[in-house]
Image (cartoon, rainbow, N blue to C red):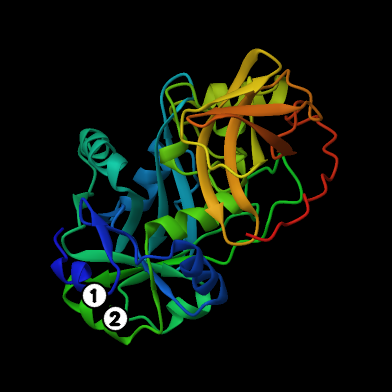
Amino acid sequence: MNHDFLTTLPGAVVEDDVLQHLGNPVAEQRSLAAGTALAVLGDRAVIAVPGEDRLSWLDSVSSQALTNLAPGESTELLILDPQGHVEHAAGVVDDGETTWLIADAADAEGLLAWLRRMRFRLRVDPRDASDEFAIVAGTRAAIAGVPAAAVWHDPWPGVTAGGWAYGSGAPERDWAEALVPVASLESVVSAAQGIAGAVAADALRVAAWRPRMADVDERTLPHEMDWLRTAVHLNKGCYRGQETVAKVHNLGHPPRRLVALQLDGVVPARGDAVRRDDAEVGTVVASALHFEEGPIALALLRRSVPVDAALAVATADGDVAAAQEVIVPPDAGATADVPRMPRLGRRAS
């Protein structure tokens, strides 16, 4: 998708057709959170799934119960491998005729190819609709006035029907993503009170502990990311990877656990090692400079790491102290007694 007009916006930094920011991503975060700006998300892709069998078919191949999804209702699905590892993820909204999937652009080609292989003789015809629709995002109130074919309201951090929250005290998140016809995008941008880029949008989701496919590696189980909240229905019919999902949830604990980190002055990179003393105990999966909390990150740690352990992140600038906030507790599972963890104090940026 080519939106050359984005490069003409004052201060615009555009990379690979993705508007990264307009010179001040921290200020853009403030505006996004306040509902006075819209984010143009070129790092998202749209997959359209029309056809009479679309909802029951998506139900059968994914982690989410979708057969009775009402028009306008928003949810989320995961595609798992046979061992229960996350392969693909997408936001889901149906308009009564078409089910719309919003995916990370880097994941969309693989997701679409997999869906097309799984059609068999069912009445479904998934296609890439990214040349037809762009994703414009912001608070629900900010998106309400945007002309859109459909709007996905992020269910995070709520617990959807059939879901399960491992953590407690998750930050609130007011977020919606609108499918704007490409022909209307320039006029939507021109009419907006403010515009933000992908950097600001991602910082807000990191602060909300919200997982996305960019955080996933080949070993990721949905339990490790607290993704059972919104993307897994524990009581639906059989799907690929369900046995692992049920076994880990009902009989065990995920081998890794997601934590939020607040860091001392340095924003780490994805893939930076998290250390306890001299031992590597985890990996940074996402990071940002937040407009209130300063440098923050999400990291996957070994389950055995104590919740009060002193941690450091090995960054390009050297080891940086990191304060750990529990998202997924070490005893996460159906029988866990989950304590309410206090939020760490916010810091001025």
Can residue 316 be seen? yes
In this rendering, is residue 60 above or below 185?
Answer: above
Residue 131 location (% of width, % of height): 16, 60
Q: Which residue is mark 2?
A: 188
Residue 261 location (% of width, % of height): 65, 40
Residue 121 placement, left or right of 78: left
Q: Which residue is mark 1?
A: 185
In this rendering, is residue 186 above or below 314?
Answer: below
- The residue shown at (17%, 66%) is 3
Quick check: marks 2 and 1 in contact, CB under 8 Å? yes
User: Disc 2 residue type?
Assistant: Val
Residue 4 placement, left or right of 221: left
Report how far apart the C-alphas of labels 2 and 1 lie in the structure: 5 Å
Residue 297 placement, left or right of 331: left
In this rendering, is residue 92 above or below 72?
Answer: above
Residue 234 location (% of width, % of height): 61, 38
Disc 1: CA contacts within 10 A as few (<14), some (14-19) or many (>=20):
many
- Image quadrant holding the C terminus, namely bottom right
Can residue 50 be seen? no
Residue at disc 1, secondary structure: helix
Q: Residue furthest top?
A: 279
Q: Nearer the viewer, residue 347 or 338?
A: 347
- The residue shown at (45%, 45%) is 77
Disc 2: CA contacts within 10 A as few (<14), some (14-19) or many (>=20):
some
Image quadrant in which you'd find residue 233: top right
Q: Nearer the viewer, residue 188 or 236?
A: 188
Residue 172 location (% of width, % of height): 66, 61
Image quadrant in which you'd find residue 341: top right
